[in-house]
Image (cartoon, rainbow, N blue to C red):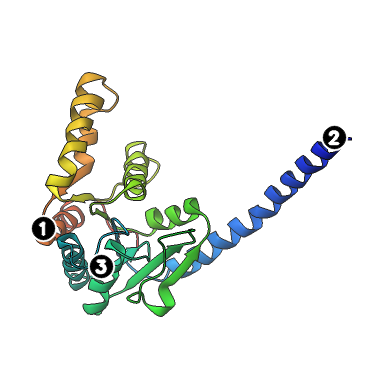
Amino acid sequence: MRNEQKHKNWNEVKTNDSWAIFKIMGEFVNGYEKMSRIGPCVSIFGSARTKPEDPNYKLAENIAKKITENGYGVITGGGPGIMEAGNKGAHLAGGTSVGLNITLPFEQHDNPYIDSDKSIDFDYFFVRKVMFVKYSQGFVVMPGGFGTLDEFFEALTLIQTHKIDKFPIILVGKAFWSGLWDWITSTLLHANNNISEGDLDLVHIVDTEDEVLHVLNDFYEKSNHSPNF
């Protein structure tokens, strides 16, 4: 009897997994339809816990303003902290402000600076991450936690393995990122040869909004690459 019950429960799990495919497909379709109309944008990542009085909040806001004033829109994860700062900067500059919201048991709620027609909700992190990568002309990575690192390393891996076209990845805050970058250089590259010397060139580390804009413009003006719109 117990084995029969286990068999029944396992069949129910497999059925639920199959039906989940349709929900995943729906998120992809909705995301593609809405994101395909946004125009060239840059994604800004960073901690949801950063408060408005934190210098990094104001820096993210200024970066978003500068980006928007130079023809790009801004995409964030749609929540508070650095995400809110990015959307706020784009909103105040009159530019495109996109929020890719994720359903979480804590922390996440959409911020008030997202364009009403460009706020998109996701249940699945992996679908949301596809939207960031597919529709961004660059990643601006502010200080953050595991989620920020996840986005950074995923984009870096996809570019390194030539699964996506190269675009600028910009780490903002030399003091914050230097420890990680020193470890990548000394341990991954020199001590273990786990990456190539050229992989280091995929990332720029800066401190100011002007440096962010310079990296973006230099990439698209002086290379053979172009925004994907």
Image position of 2 with respect to 215: above or below: above
Residue beneath the point at 40% across and 42% down: 163
Residue 121: assigned label: none
Rendered location of residue 135, percent (x, y): 38, 59
Image position of 127 with respect to 196: above or below: below
Quarter of the rendering containing residue 13: top right
Q: Say which quadrant the C terminus sits in.
A: bottom left
Mark 2 secondary-structure assignment: helix
Are there few (<14), some (14-19), or many (20+) residues within 10 Å of tag 2?
Answer: few
Looking at numbered disc 1 in the image, what kind of residue is underneath it?
Thr
Quarter of the rendering containing residue 138: bottom left
Mark 1 secondary-structure assignment: loop
Residue beneath the point at 27% across and 57% down: 226
Residue 208: assigned label: 1
Q: Which label lies toward us, 3 or 1?
A: 3
Q: Between residues 88 and 170, which one lies in front from this camera angle?
A: 88
Q: Which residue in the structure is indicated by mark 2?
A: 2
Q: Which label lies toward us, 2 or 1?
A: 2
Q: Say which quadrant the N terminus sits in.
A: top right
Q: Which residue in the structure is indicated by mark 3?
A: 85
Looking at numbered disc 3 in the image, what kind of residue is underneath it?
Ala
Q: CA distance from mark 3 to mark 2?
A: 55 Å
Mark 3 secondary-structure assignment: helix
Q: Which label lies toward us, 3 or 2?
A: 2
Residue beneath the point at 84% across and 39% down: 5
Rendered location of residue 121, percent (x, y): 49, 66
